[in-house]
Amino acid sequence: MNHRKTCCSRDFTLVVAGQIVSLFGNAILRFALPLYLLKETGSSALFGTVTACALLPMILLSLLGGVLADRVNKRNIMVGLDFLTAFVITVFYFLVGMVPVAPLFIVTLMLLYGISGTYQPAVQASIPALVPKGRILWAGAVVNQVGSLANFTGPVIGGMLYGLWGIGSILRVSILCFILSAMMEIFIVIPFHGRPTEKRILCVVKEDMKESIWFLRKKKPVFIRICFMIAGLNLFLSSMITIGIPVIIVERLSMADQLLGLTQGLLAVGGMIGGLFTVVFAKKLRPGKAWIFLLLCAFSACVMGAGMLLAEQLRFLKYLILSGTGLLVMVFSTMFSIQMLAVVQTQTPAELTGKVVACIMAFIMCAQPAGQLLYGLLFEKISVETPFIMVSTGAVSFFIALYAKKILKELGGEEDNA
């Protein structure tokens, strides 16, 4: 606790600064690589398939990341993985244009997503180690704001770079970002007490996961129900946004790459606004009422689909509706997710935080590959029914919000008794 009070400012600031640079590099890559693939192949089904395949190692390695976050110095994890990411992108830079597009993108994205899955538990687990318990919600919102800021500037700047100089400029900038981030993170001091073991790493992973699952089943079963709820949102709403927006803007509306970058940036602005609202209204927000934000997400998705029914001559108005409602979805979903993560972080013992967060993240991410594959096929096979796809997604999200209302009542009761 003394370390938290005396070193919180310096070390937490370094974590945030490293995240700004690292996540900006991630953001321009997430914008440019899918766009390059979509424009090279013109297939939304292949786009969805590649994206789905890329998520699989992220799911598996996030479990390993949770174990490592509790047993290895978190700073070393962040530094090593940032350097490794720079190396992977460098190899990709020299191979692009020389080998077939689909296998190159599948392998590269699988590596990048796998690294990200291992990296994020270390960041999330470092927050309770660096800030007082009463400021965890604030710190989580700050980290979320950093991610949203990077996700805003990344697509906007990435769209400009891509339009002017192509994918090569994106790759060079991202390599520089990850190297710079790793060098900054070297100077972070995170309290760490190793848990020595003579067992093999796979045995350690297995035992730690058993410990996490036991905690979730016996101590916090409400967390499991929350996981199912969020997994449902990832399967439908999140996957529709991830696959649908690029496909609609690039293929259906035939907009410029810069406008896609602007929309992706606006989605990040939505995340920033949601994080800001969470900070400002932190004392008034109650987890038991968080289902209302999911209801607002569902309504926004329905409006998004209705906007696609406008005449073809109004394609710029359709673009504005798509971007505006996407922004609203991000505002409300961010306010919901920050509250849920803060609940997990505050109600989980410190020695289990990394593993439990990783276990939850892995579970809820399992739905994303299936959802992205599904929507890739839907947008290609029944492209004329785009409004129906989006409104149906909003309707499903509405029922998920009602399910969430029942679950979060229990969570609200626990908060009242705390």
Image (cartoon, rainbow, N blue to C red):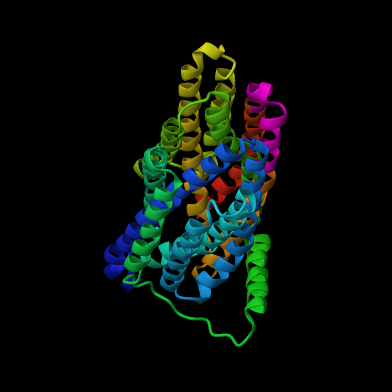
Left or right position of 349 against 398: left
Instruction: Give the residue displayed 41% in from the left and 69% down from the top.
Output: 79
Instruction: Give the residue displayed 50% in from the left and 13% down from the top.
Output: 314
Left or right position of 172 against 248: left
Left or right position of 253 against 226: left
* Up-down relation of residue 269 to residue 129 (above or below): above
* Up-down relation of residue 207 to residue 301 (above or below): below
Closer to the camera in the image, 336 or 47:
47
Q: Position of residue 20 (x, y in %)?
A: 35, 54
Q: Main secondary structure of the magenta part?
A: helix
Instruction: Give the residue displayed 49% in from the left and 68% down from the top.
Output: 350
Magenta-highlighted residues: 372-389
Q: Position of residue 46 (x, y in %)?
A: 66, 42
* Up-down relation of residue 63 to residue 342 (above or below): below
For the N terminus, the quadrant is bottom left
Q: Is residue 151 magenta?
A: no
Closer to the camera in the image, 311 or 161:
161
Instruction: Give the residue displayed 34% in from the left and 41% down from the top.
Output: 280
Residue 242 appears in the rendering: no
Q: Residue furthest right?
A: 381
Q: Position of residue 45 (x, y in %)?
A: 68, 38
Q: Residue furthest bottom?
A: 198
Residue 139 figure quarter: bottom left
Left or right position of 284 against 415: left
Q: Position of residue 325 (x, y in %)?
A: 49, 27
Residue 212 figure quarter: bottom right
